Amino acid sequence: MPAALSYPGVYIEEIPSGVRTITGVPTSITAFIGRALRGPVNEPVVCNGYGDFERNFGGLWEDGAMSFAVRDFFLNGGGQAVVVRLDNGSETADLSLTTTGGPLVLEAASPGAWGGKLSVVVDHNTKKTGVPAVDDLLFNLTVTDTGTRVTEKFINLSIDAASARYYPTVLAQGSTLLRVRTLPATAARPPAGTSTPAAADAGTNGSALTRTHFTQAAGLRADKKGLFALEKVDVFNLLCIAPHTLGGDIEPDLATDAAAYCEERRAIFIADPPAAWDSVADAVAGFNASSLRSKNAALYFPRLVQANPLREGQLDTFAPCGAVAGVIARTDTQRGVWKAPAGLDALLTGVPKLSVPLTDQENGQLNPLGVNCLRSLPAAGRVVWGARTTRGNDLLADEWKYLPVRRLALNIEESLFRGIQWVVFEPNDEPLWAQIRLNVGAFMQNLFRQGAFQGQTPRDAYFVKCDKETTTQNDINLGVVNIVVGFAPLKPAEFVVLKLQQMAGQVAA
């Protein structure tokens, strides 16, 4: 109603409809954490294709298994990755220029031996103002990464800190290659010429990572570093931690840490089998002895055998997490998050063979435990042939036994969590409850129409309850509104039983 009716006439008032559309969150944004050749450290970077990864992190690297996992992710249909580079003792390359005001030290934009291939050219062919006092403050700088042939040129840089072209600021904000480490004691422009890092200042790549760099070092969570750098990311759905070395593993406790963090963030951790699992017996014994039993984790066996471009195309063994994440993303796009990312359509692209070929009987040993198998099938090729979480052991009878059921629940939870924020501080009574039922019901109905639930009618498929039964007067006094949402999930048809019967011909009496 208008604030005041002061004059005779017609007043127009817009009445809210009560419709607040709930949008589903993405389902297959994949986070990768590990070593890379270059790039920012402890900073999540969104990559929408493998080209983005190459530009930001340097592409494939023999000492960085993560680079191969990211390659496999995009090769198998992945759409968006969030990459976090971690570091263990890498040193940043630097080069020193002698000026009349003292040494000017420039450094590579990120640690690593890649910075040793930088080349800097300075010239004084700047824009002339006719005022020597101004012209003598300007210079041009061209920096080239001779390893990748990427070149950046900055013209009319100034040594005047008050200038909009002050060179430390311009390089910090505009260059992906170079930064200023130490300024001369007295402001002075660098001399014209070419400079490269000295051998002693060429940078190093450091050592392999350990669990400490992900979750155990002091202050990681508070500083949003290591695994907790993902706190800077709004949402991710899948998490891959590639082995610390190309043919190695991550620590079992790190896998447990990752799964626990995924439970906090409503994501799924894709675990790799240890390199020592080179037979089904090893896999059965190893998984039974492991502590990875999370409803938000899935493990895939065996590893992949692929061509290694860094070794002239020779076959090498790689962890499957990146390829599996790509298959999951592709399945989400084609069928939906409720479809199990497995079967004849779940083809592993770029995988000519598997490290351990599995038979049906061997698959039958692993599947009941909750280990998802990768199979090589005639005509189909290499495919994902399992869709269970690590709580998928038949003996556990867990409600989150199947990966698609768990992922659908996480998607609904995250979507509703974000979509009903408007409810906070609203008057807690029947009009609000009706709005909640309307908007949450519309979201669930949309999923039902897409085929996400069991049942032929909405009543069979889901329910949304928010009324005086779920929210009592005591709840209202405490400022609480309770919403109950239920759904009937689709379960994958793991076992197809075909029954044949011979028809006996009729015998005349």
Image (spheres, grey):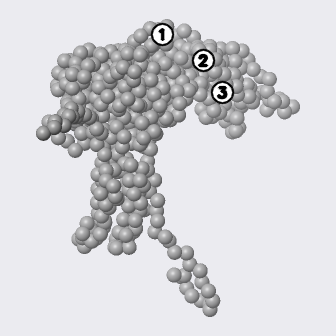
- State which tag comes first along the sequence, 1 or 3: 3
Where is the C terminus found, in terms of image quarters? Answer: top left
Q: List x then y, in percent, for residue 427.
A: 37, 72
Q: Is residue 162 above or below residue 68?
A: below
Query: Helix, strand or loop at disc 3?
Result: loop
- State which tag comes first along the sequence, 3 or 2: 2
Report the disc number at residue 117: none
Q: List x then y, in percent, for residue 132.
A: 83, 29
**For the residues carrying marks 1 and 3, which lies nearer the camera in this image?**
1
- Taking depth in this image into account, of 121 and 160 the one nearest to the observer is 121
**As drawn, is 455 to the left or to the right of 93?**
left
Crowd class of label 2 (few under 14; some 14 to 19; many from 20; radius 10 Å): few
Residue at the disc numbered 2: 148
Query: Helix, strand or loop at disc 1?
Result: loop
- State which tag comes first along the sequence, 2 or 1: 2
Residue located at (53% from left, 34% from top): 48
| Quadrant housing residue 483 | bottom left
Residue at the disc numbered 1: 313
Crowd class of label 3 (few under 14; some 14 to 19; many from 20; radius 10 Å): few
Residue located at (40% from left, 21% from top): 379
User: Among all residues in the image, which is located at the extreme left?
Assistant: 509
Residue at the disc numbered 3: 186
Residue located at (69% from left, 14% from top): 194
**For the residues carrying marks 3 and 2, which lies nearer the camera in this image?**
2
Q: List x then y, in percent, for residue 118.
A: 60, 17
